[in-house]
Each structure stands twice: as C-alpha cells, then as structure tokens.
Image: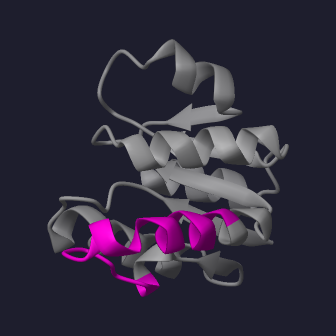
Amino acid sequence: MRVYLAGPIFQCEDHECIHWRENAKNLLDGHQVIDPMERDYRGITDENHAQIVEEDKALIDNCDVLLANHLKPSVGTSMEILYAWERKKRIYAVSNNGQVSPWLLYHCQRIFQTLEGAVDHIKNGGVA
C-alpha cells in the first residue's frame, strides 16, 4: 500500500513539516510512504509553484491512501485532500483541533485524534 503524507509545508518550520512525517514513516513500516518533503521547496516556492503542484498531483495519483496532518490549517493540504477525493483515494486525517470543518468531514473517510490511531487504521486495511 502506498501512503501519501499530506500536511503543511509552506511557511512551516521543520518541527511542523518534517518531524511528524518521519514519525509516520517509522510507524508505517512495511508500507511504501510517499513524502513530498523529500523535495523541500521552502524558500523557493514562488518560482517553482507549477512544478510543486504538478509533482504533488503525480505523487497523489500514485498513492492508495492520503494521510493528512490537519493540526495546522493549510491551503495546500486542503487542495491535496480534494484532489485525492476526486480520484477516489482513501483519505484519513489527523486533527485534534476540536471542531472540524464540514469540508474535512465530507472528504475524509475518517478523522483521528492521533497519528498513531490513523496509522493503526491504515495498517489494519482501513478496518477497525
């Protein structure tokens, strides 16, 4: 199973965009993880915006599941969720922000309070 790690990158510090992905990769041991942070465009996004979006779309096209970190609002993450949903990908989000947007509720199969809960669900094949 190929899992795309969606989450804030633009205007984020390492602890916001890298650390949770490294944790997710460790937890998803045995699955192919697609990490858009392997192409770190922070600081040069304006001149590379088309390439960033097209590469992200291609990566999402090649995933089975999109796992979204929604602990911090992000336009890019929201767009990735919609793009994946339109392609009938399974979408799970992690959000402990209390009330969740109706848009996120609509487009995700399930929303989890913790990364560990989302990963357990994915590892169980989306059951439980």
Report the front residue among 114 and 79: 79
Q: Is residue 45 magenta?
A: yes
Farthest front residue?
A: 47
Residue 64 position within the rendered picture, expressed as x and y whole percent measured from the top left? 80, 62
Direction from residue 14 to residue 64 in the image, left or right: right
Give the number of callouts.
Answer: 0
Q: How is the image coloured?
A: one colour
Q: In terms of secondary structure, what is the magenta stretch mainly?
A: helix
Question: Which residue is painted at 51% across and 50% down in the image?
Answer: 68
Direction from residue 61 to residue 101 in the image, left or right: left
The relative height of residue 33 versus residue 75 in the rendered view (above or below) is below
Q: Quadrant of residue 43?
A: bottom left
Question: Which residue is painted at 50% across and 66% down in the image?
Answer: 50
Quarter of the picture containing the C terminus is: top right
Residue 105 position within the rendered picture, expressed as x and y whole percent measured from the top left? 58, 21
Direction from residue 68 to residue 61 in the image, left or right: right
Question: Which residue is painted at 32% across and 73% down in the image?
Answer: 47
Direction from residue 75 to residue 109 in the image, left or right: right
Residue 48 position within the rendered picture, expressed as x and y whole percent measured from the top left? 39, 74
Q: Which range is magenta?
A: 38-57
The relative height of residue 40 versus residue 112 in the rendered view (above or below) is below
Quarter of the picture containing the N terminus is: bottom right
Question: Which residue is painted at 48% across and 70% down in the image?
Answer: 52
Residue 23 position within the rendered picture, expressed as x and y whole percent measured from the top left? 39, 74
